[in-house]
Amino acid sequence: MIWAFHDVNPNTDSTKLFRMISALRIRFPHAGIMCGITLLAGKADHGGLYQDMPIGHKPWTELLCVDSGRRRFDGICKLARMNVEPSVEVVSHGLVHVQHAALHIDAQRMSIVASCQWLGADAFIPPFDSYNADTMKVCEEHGITLEPVRKNAWHCLERYPFDPSHDRWHCHPWKWTAEKFEETINVA
C-alpha cells in the first residue's frame, strides 16, 4: 500500500501531519508514504494553499500572490530534510500549485526541476493531476518520476470510502483533523 499526502505546504500544520503519518505507520506498518510538497503558497490559516479554497479556477494573479515566509517553513523543512520522519518519501507538488498542463514547457521545467532540486526529491505529483507531453518530457529529461493520480489508479480519501484492499491512496491534510483521519483508517 502507498499513501500520498498532497498539498503539503508552508501553511501545513506539521504536528497534525506527523500525527497522521504515525497513524498510518500503526495501522499499515509496511505502507509507503509520500508527501507532495508545494513550496510557495498564499497565506491561509486552515493549512491549505490559499485562504479561499478550492483554487482550481482562480485567476493567475491570485495564484501567484504567495506568502511563504521563512518562519512558516520550519515544519516543512524538517520533513523535507527527513529529520523528523525518515521513512517518508518527499516528492514535489510544484513550486506553485497550478495546472502544469496549462504552462509553457519552460515554466513547467522551472516549477518541477527547481522544486525537486530544493526538496532533494526525484518524483513529481502534478497538482490537479494536470500534466501533458511537455510535463512528461521535462520529467524524463531530468530523471524525475512523474506520479499521475488517475493513470496510476490512486483513490482520493475525500472522494472514496476507505478500503484497505486498494493499494494507492491520497488525501489533502488540510481537509482533515488528525482524529477524523485516524477514525477513517480505523486507528483511533
Image (spheres, rainbow, N blue to C red):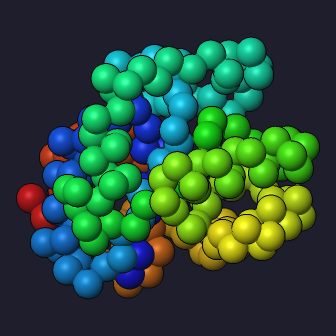
Residue 84 placed where, x, y %? Answer: 20, 56
48 vs 77, left or right, is right
Residue at 68 percent across and 52 percent down: it is 112
153 vs 31, left or right, is right
**Rendered-image quadrant of the C terminus:** bottom left
Residue at 88 percent across and 59 percent down: it is 134
Between 133 and 105, the one nearer to me in the picture: 105
User: Can the viewer see residue 90?
Assistant: yes
Residue 95 placed where, x, y %? Answer: 61, 40
**Rendered-image quadrant of the N terminus:** bottom left
Q: Determine whether 125 is above or below 163 in the image.
A: above
Q: Within the image, what quadrant is residue 151 found in?
A: bottom right
Residue at 31 percent across and 79 percent down: it is 31
Q: Determine whether 53 is above or below 154 in the image.
A: above
Residue 60 placed where, x, y %? Answer: 77, 22
Residue 135 placed where, x, y %? Answer: 81, 59
The tally of labels here is 0
Q: Determine whether 105 is above or below 160 in the image.
A: above
Furthest-left residue in view? 188
Residue at 17 percent across and 52 percent down: it is 19
User: Can the viewer see residue 170?
Assistant: no
Q: Determine whether 13 is above or below 148 in the image.
A: above
